[in-house]
Amino acid sequence: MSTNKYTQTQHLYLRAAFGETVEVIAEKADKKPKKLVRELFEQAASSKDLIVIKENPLSTEELMEMSKEEKQELRRESKDKIKELNLLWLDRMADSQAAFREKMTLFWHGHFACQSANVFFVQQQNNAIRKNALGKFSDLLMAVSKSAAMLEFLNNKQNRKDSPNENFAREVMELFTLGRGNYTENDIKNAAKAFTGWSFDEDGTFRLRQRQHDEGQKTFMGKTGNFSGEDILQMLLENKQTAVFITIKIYKYFVNENPPQELIKDLAEKFYTSGYDIGALMEEIFTSDWFYAPENIGTRIKSPVELLVGLRKQLGLTFQDREAQLLVQKVLGQVLFFPPNVAGWKEGKSWIDSSTLMIRLLLVGVLSKDGATWQAKQDGDVNTDFFAKKRLINIKGTFDLKGYQQVFGKTNPKNLVEEMASYLLQTPLVGNNQKLLQLKSQNSTIEEFINATALALASVPEYQLA
Amino acid sequence: MKRRDFIQQTALTAVGGLLVPSFLKAFEYGRGITEQGKILVIIQLSGGNDGLNTVVPYTNDIYYQSRPSIAIDKTQVLRLNDDLGFHPALPKMKQLYDEGLLSIVNSVGYPNPDRSHFRSMDIWHTASNANEYLTTGWLGRYLDNQCNGNCPSYHAIEVDDTLSLVLKGEKTKAMALQQPEKLYKSTQVPFVKVLSQQTVDEHSPASYLYKTLAETVSSAEYIYSKAKVQKSSSTYGGGELGNRLKTVAELILSGVPTQVYYLSIAGFDTHIRQTDTHQRLLSNYDEAVSSFVQDLKSNGLLDKVMIMTFSEFGRRVAQNASNGTDHGTANNVFLIGKNLKKAGFYNKASQLTNLDDGDLVHEIDFRRIYADLLKKWLNVDSRQILGQDFAELGVV
């Protein structure tokens, strides 16, 4: 089954985006990967901003004039708007033709993990990532490092009493570029000096506060000079280790968790020489034969967001209460715009424990039945406990499965389960599953059987694999 | 046939006999853990409990000057010694103190304290340095160390619907269950039950998922079968925490070999109008924990159990403009049990004169408490789990 053309086609869409409907898989299965990849790039060519608010609602000037109650109200509104941005992004992932760009944005969002209570800054950073998601990593790094949300998060929000700029310098090196062990504490101390004065205006525009900036000599990675923050970032990019670090991260996310050394060396070299062209790297990955090798198919556990968006696409799922999607993210352990910490989400097997696995398996059933009322754990932070919600949220949805009738309506009933599985699952049904599912055809019409099978296939553990 | 019926009924009806994979049986009999040894119960107060109003320095002028409207009145304080006393909502904790069952460690924290809930809680959960980002919890690593991937997940249980980082190891994860019956019922949905019985090739990418599923179903069934037999006759006060501690008591009474129970209650982030909220929270805590201790006592089980209570940080010394307090740093930690090596106050409380920009300075690194618990209570090598050596505290 791993060489089945439907599985191979779905493999590309699951990795480069969030999976595709059976209608699209049927249409594209005979086309060459190179062509499909080209299409993905074409559709993702332009970047459209996600907008939920037009200006900074928490600008200092206005805040100063307000009463305490008014300030609290504003903060509450900002919180609500972040929820809205979260939901809007999910919609974009599920409905946009440029899903490839959205998947890349999601990946970079995890890489440059950051939290902010100011929806305007969150939005701004998200769009900056989106715009540069397939461009040059150098541009992306610069844009994110200078984003108000990131500066706020790593300088002030983390609330350290020791040097806040050291915090920023450390994170940039450890998590965003070189990775641990490739710099010294002195490098951090000196880089921190170069980042002094890095700040932002009310409207989120980057501003260098000259008076706060250290104009002295800094020694960084063996070189000495009056380096600016930009210089430091530039030097980090000039270090090939950055290309290696990023390439490994991309490989682990999009291919498999065990990157072969020689291949990484080769890919990283090209990535570096191309001037950190992300698009070129992704194109090479998606058009290589090894990408479609059996050992890379179905080996990735879908992240909560990938699962959620995938269900919306593949089952035409609509939630009765849109906000239920926030709760689903929460109980499965991934909420957009709220990464657990600056290191991002752990991915892979860490998505799975006794509790999250049960939820993943029962989700479709719960949505199609009478729904259920769930409650998430409260973190203790008054600002984000809205995800826990004192009132229990009803999880109910509707499914649009017409596409399945269209594609499988004429299939021989004896082969239906196997056929449908080849479109929806990236690994063969285990044990007796196929036999057991096939049995259900006995007491229902073809139409009912097709619909029921679609929902059942989305409920087995195999569906959790991408 | 309706779609919903399909799912509701046996979506995957078993054909012929049901084959139970052999490793399932091993879990049921708790391979590796046959006896109920010492038990650690951890209660996490989420949000940053105000330690200064919990253990009150009632003779300290700075305390009263810093909190003109929310300080606990001297006459209301339940005095424990000449300097410190409890918030009036903790009469039962006072009783435990008097009976020598409570140890209070003051000024617990860590270098370069972080005042962000997420970050600080992560630090407590992963036992990392303030500038480190670890992705496994200290109790998760304890499970890795103990089990090498072979324990049933109920070796440690978090009494909640979702599992926290603290109980996630590299290879092993604890079990999250709020009520044994609820989890059991979800695993008995016919569709799930049949899936859990499938035999899967080790090399299939789906094997990890099926293994976890089988283990979950097996553990849920085991826990439920034990818990339903053993219903505690005691009534528990203290709201939700009381309910959860009652569940823990029933599990302990039933003899399940679970070694760690983890519970958390929220609501302690008292930025605004602290007085009433804090009163209610502490009162719930007082009722719930004392009910639990009493229950264990009357069943002769108290000597098996150690209870640790902590919060991710304390709060600032001075009150804010909203009759509340903001995020602070060091805090006190409670340890409850019989045979504590040092009952009562482990150390003196801060005089409030040597503050770090209005915040308490920590004196005891929280990892020393973890080390004590790991070494002395759970009897394991704390160095491996915590990544470094920590000076013995000598409380446990």
Image (cartoon, coloured by chain):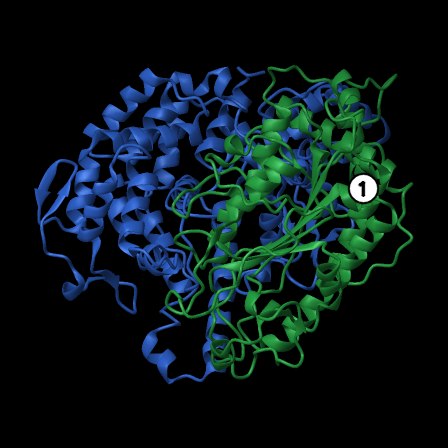
B281 to B34, vertically: above or below: below
Quarter of the view holding residue B227: top right
B85 to A198, vertically: above or below: below
Q: Which chain is blue?
A: A
B168 with respect to A434 (left or right):
left
**Chain under numbered label 1:** B
Residue in front for this viewpoint, A230 or B359: B359
Examine the rendering and report whether any part of residue B86 can be seen: yes
A135 to A253, vertically: above or below: below
B244 with respect to A245 (left or right):
right
What kind of element bears circle 1? helix
| Label 1 Cα neighbours within 10 Å, binned few <14 / some 14-19 / many ≥20 | many
Residue A359 at what x, y percent from top left? 68, 41
Q: How many labels does the image show?
A: 1
A15 to B159, vertically: above or below: above
Residue in front for this viewpoint, B131 or B36: B36
B181 with respect to A270 (left or right):
right
Q: Which residue: 71% across, 47% down?
A: B159
Q: Which residue: 48% across, 69% down?
A: B326
Residue in front for this viewpoint, B254 or B379: B379
**Looking at the figure, which quarter contains the N terminus of chain A?**
top right
Residue in front for this viewpoint, B389 or A393: B389
Q: What residue is disc 1 on?
A: B252
Q: Which chain is green?
A: B
Residue B162 at what x, y percent from top left? 65, 46
Residue B40 at what x, y percent from top left? 69, 42
Residue A262 at what x, y percent from top left? 32, 16
